[in-house]
Image (cartoon, rainbow, N blue to C red):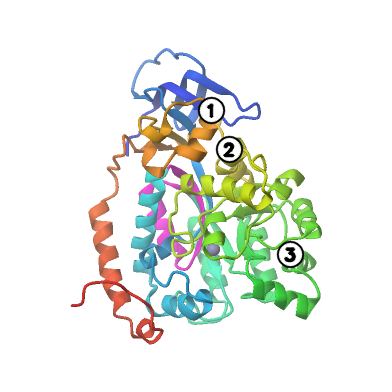
Amino acid sequence: MTEKKHVLIKNALILTMNPRKDVFYGGSILIEDGIILKVQPGEISLPAGDIQVLDARGGIVMPGMINSHTHLGMSFFRSLADDQKDRLRRVLFPLEKAVVTDDLVYWASLHSYTEMIQGGVTTLFDMYYFEDAVARAARKAGVRSILGETVVYFPAPDSPREYGGIGYAREFIQQWKHQDLITPAIAPHAPYTVDGDHMKECYELACREEVPMTLHLSEMPFEMEHFQKDYGMSPIAYLDDLGVLDSRVVAAHCIFTDDPDRQILKKRGVGVAHNMVANIKGAKGVAAIPEMLELGIPVGLGSDGPMSGNTQDVISLMGYTTKFHKFTRLDPQAMPPESVVEMATIGGARALHIADRVGSLEIGKEADIVIMDHSSPSMFPVYDPYSVLVYGASPRDVDTVLVKGRILMEHREILHLDIPEIRGKGQEYFEKVCSLPALKDLGLKIIRPEN
Ligand SMILES: [Zn+2]
């Protein structure tokens, strides 16, 4: 990880994502101690002293991308039991109980962080168990991370007691508060896995400690039926009745919303994590994002876990997001590329309530920056950089990544993480998962050479 007092990025096509959406050709960015000091068209003269110069070679320079909903610790389960019915309750919960440990979460999170850096993700909001292990991985990886400890009604991998996540979160928050790039948080799993009293307890802890809260919301058909049947209202109206919705909350999914639901989200200042790829892969539905944006609800893009969305970068999400919203409305202008790049950057920062610090390339903001190489055939020519990013880019076009001015990847090289070691740990856990009797009993398909 390179860290110098000054970093200068030059020869760049800069998408600032500032309020005017300024685009600078042949532009430069000067960073001092992790903060953007100058961003402008043309050249900046070199300051004296210790300076790292990055030549963008005409590539697209944009704010680091924000993944607003992840489960990093699940990356060693990717491609397992895809497309199974009721996978969450039938496969996932028993699998986690059998195999998830602090050590697995640490290595699986590091594996995820590698993918994030390679895909240009500089900020994420995670929800899983053993978040202390995720925080240690985050510190090693150098990626800006908001980390929510999961709370559920049943004994979880990191707690033998029901709702043990609340106690874990209490300690976790104390331990990781006031870190530079790491923000601890609490994550009641969903309104159908956390009862009203415990939901309030989570919210009160978040308020007391002044940390964010995230949860899955209005995601499952059975969830919608349950709240309608038992409470005569939607899960969003139910949470509003409990008094647990405000601007510290990030709600993942929100697939099934009506206009009153969206009015509540807007009124309370809730951020929404839109997980298009996971939602369409699970054949769940498409959230009413154009309506939310129209209302002014802050919306970011999320990959969901690597078992749900499989890829965890944000570039892969952008194309699907615009195409599916256009397709479901039969309107090619339903979601322009510029609005998707906005959700991937400053919109995501708004959804996570951190837009005062990151999400755009503006003087005074922290320097979370991605340099996209545009030498691949699908990235050329650039009549419209937003269009190129959304319809033509892949994570492999990410060249260089900075978080708060630190270079985490340069010309696709990550020097501060031992990628073969991480992969080796992943292989060990793969073997372990393959031999789990509980999975054999479920008759899941695992295609691998017989021993
Ligand atoms: Zn999720």
Residue 204 at x, y percent in the picture: 68, 65
Q: Amino acid at mark 3?
A: Ile
Q: Is mark 2 within 8 Å of ligand 1?
A: no
Q: Nearer the viewer, mark 3 or mark 1?
A: 1
Q: Which residues are magenta?
A: 120-144
Q: Is residue 299 visible?
A: yes
Which secondary structure, mark 2? helix
Q: Which residue is mark 1?
A: 384
Quarter of the image that includes the C terminus: bottom left
Which sits in the foreground, 71 or 249? 71
Residue 97 at x, y percent in the picture: 43, 79
Q: Which residue is mark 2?
A: 337
Give me the disc on residue 236: 3
Q: CA distance from mark 1 to mark 2?
A: 10 Å
* CB atoms of marks 1 and 2 within 8 Å: yes
Label 3 crowding class (10 Å Cα cut-off): few <14, some 14-19, many 20+?
Answer: many
Q: Amino acid at mark 2?
A: Pro
